[in-house]
Image (tube, grey):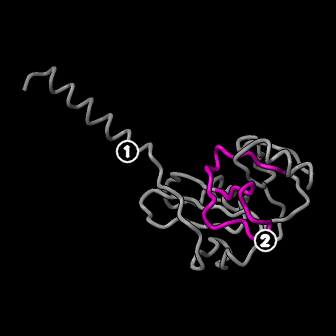
Amino acid sequence: MKPLPLLALMSFVAACSAEKAIEPPAPVAMTEEALGHYCQMNLLEHPGPKAQVRLEGMAAPLFFSQMRDALAYQRSSEQSHPILAIYVSDMGRAESWEAPGADNWISGEAAYYVAGATLHGGMGAPEFVPFSSRQAAGDFAARHGGQVVTLDAIPDEDV
């Protein structure tokens, strides 16, 4: 095979491989079998936003009772596999604080968060409340206190 066609073929294969690696696995609906990674309790029994972390090489996600728990997991050194995606409950589409939804997931990186709200998460700790729109986050903050931030603006010490 001539060098130029071989080089073109190798570039095509590399591009296809890179394209597949970029596509994270989709979120899965929360069911009665979904247990919190840290607490091992049924998530549907707890109020407030939830999170799921999709790991490389694992078919099932790790679920978290609070969004802040997923953030703590992401920022800790305990992961056994690389993180491919973090999904959080879009509380702008939630039925209520008590019923955050089973399949209204959004990308944790793209979400807007309300930090410092008066409401607490599923395990009773302060929470970072996720929304798909800045407007919905601002409306929530006006009702429940706090400020709108992005994920990368949340300091480690607040987690």
Disc number for residue 20:
1
At a point 53% along the width and 64% down the height, the residue shown is: 28
Q: Name the one closer to the observer, 80 or 121.
A: 121
**Residue visible at 54% across and 59% down?**
27
Q: Is residue 118 left or right of residue 44?
A: right
Q: Nearer the viewer, residue 110 or 83?
A: 110
Pick out the residue farthest to the left.
1
Magenta stretch in the rendered image: 88-115
The disc at residue 98 is: 2
Say if the magenta span includes residue 108.
yes
Q: Secondary structure at mark 1?
A: helix
**Corner quadrant of residue 144:** bottom right
Residue 84 place in picture, x, y as percent = 51, 51
Q: Position of residue 26 (x, y in %)?
A: 49, 56
Q: Residues within 10 Å of mark 2 (few under 14, many from 20)?
A: some
Quarter the N terminus occupies: top left
Q: Could you tell which of marks 1 and 2 lies nearer the N-terminus? A: 1
Instruction: Name the amino acid, label 1.
Output: Lys
> Where, by quadrant of the figure, is residue 43 drawn?
bottom right
Residue 95 pos. (x, y %): 75, 65
Which of the 4 image quadrants contains residue 46? bottom right
The C terminus lies in quadrant: bottom right
Please name the residue shown 37% across and 38% down the image.
18
Q: Main secondary structure of the magenta part?
A: loop
Query: In the image, is residue 82 part of the stretch drawn in magenta?
Result: no
User: In this rendering, is residue 147 above or below 89?
Assistant: above
Q: Amino acid at mark 2?
A: Glu
- Closer to viewer: mark 1 or mark 2: 2
